[in-house]
Amino acid sequence: MKIGIIGAGNIGGNLTRRLTALGHDVSVANSRGPETLRELAEETGATPVRAEDAAEGAEVVIVTVPLKAVPGLPSGLLDGAAEGAVVIDTGNYYPQRDGRIAAIEDEGLTESRWTEQHLGHPVIKAFNGTYAQDLLDRARPAGDPDRMALPVAGDDEGAKRTVRTLIDELGFDTVDAGTIADSWRQQPGTPVYGLRAGTPAVEKALAEATPERPADFRA
């Protein structure tokens, strides 16, 4: 599968490592230019590209940048993606880093709905509460009692299936966390955020979430 990754931080870098190791054709971009990704490219075999080229021909595009950087992504970012491309949003709203986003704080927009509006494309929310190192260290085969489960939210059931299949390939179970309108259940400060557990515990944590955003995650 051709995959474009926009953002080469902890999550983006480790997804690049895992997905290339699984045989996927990965292009990776950051805000500083492809020349700064030479080391990651040499390690993984991924193709370093400019952000505006990362989605070219991609069947899956992973956007893994700070929320404050989303409005500054190149215009038409997804124009060259494959027809029916699936976009994964790994982002979280941290007001101490991102500044105050009124649409999220005052209007109750979920983080991923806000991102969708800026990208002009539906997204699937996944990996946002996953520790980056766990992507390398905690993959397990299907059926392993220690296999972690990750929540996945989105409005398009076909796109969600694509993402869940990819996560299964990476060595993790998944739990359907509902639509993007429901994705607040996996935002920072909720019981499932950062939870290292299997399917029953993740389902329970999602059910126990409340929409009130904790003070630590408000501006």
Image: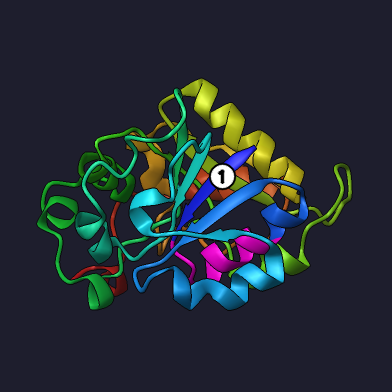
Q: Residues within 10 Å of mark 1 (few under 14, many from 20)?
A: many
Q: Which residues are magenta?
A: 7-17
Percent of width and height locating residue 197: 70, 57
Between 64 and 20, the one lying in front of the other is: 20
Percent of width and height locating residue 69: 26, 64
For residue 161, which quarter of the picture? Answer: top right
Viewer can see residue 61? yes
Percent of width and height locating residue 31: 34, 69
Pick the quarter of the image with the C terminus.
bottom left
Is residue 8 in the magenta section?
yes
Looking at the image, residue 210 lies above or below residue 179 = below
The secondary structure making up most of the magenta span is helix
Between 36 and 197, the one lying in front of the other is: 36
Looking at the image, residue 168 lies above or below residue 146 = above
Residue sitting at x 78%, y 58%: 139
Residue sitting at x 45%, y 23%: 84
45 horizontally vs 55: left or right: right
Badge 1 element: strand
Between 105 and 101, the one lying in front of the other is: 101
Give the residue type that dot 1 points to: Ile
Residue sitting at x 69%, y 65%: 44
Is residue 143 in the magenta section?
no
Viewer can see residue 192? no
For residue 39, which quarter of the picture? Answer: bottom right
**Label 1, on which residue?**
3
Pick the quarter of the image with the N terminus.
top right
95 horizontally vs 205: left or right: left
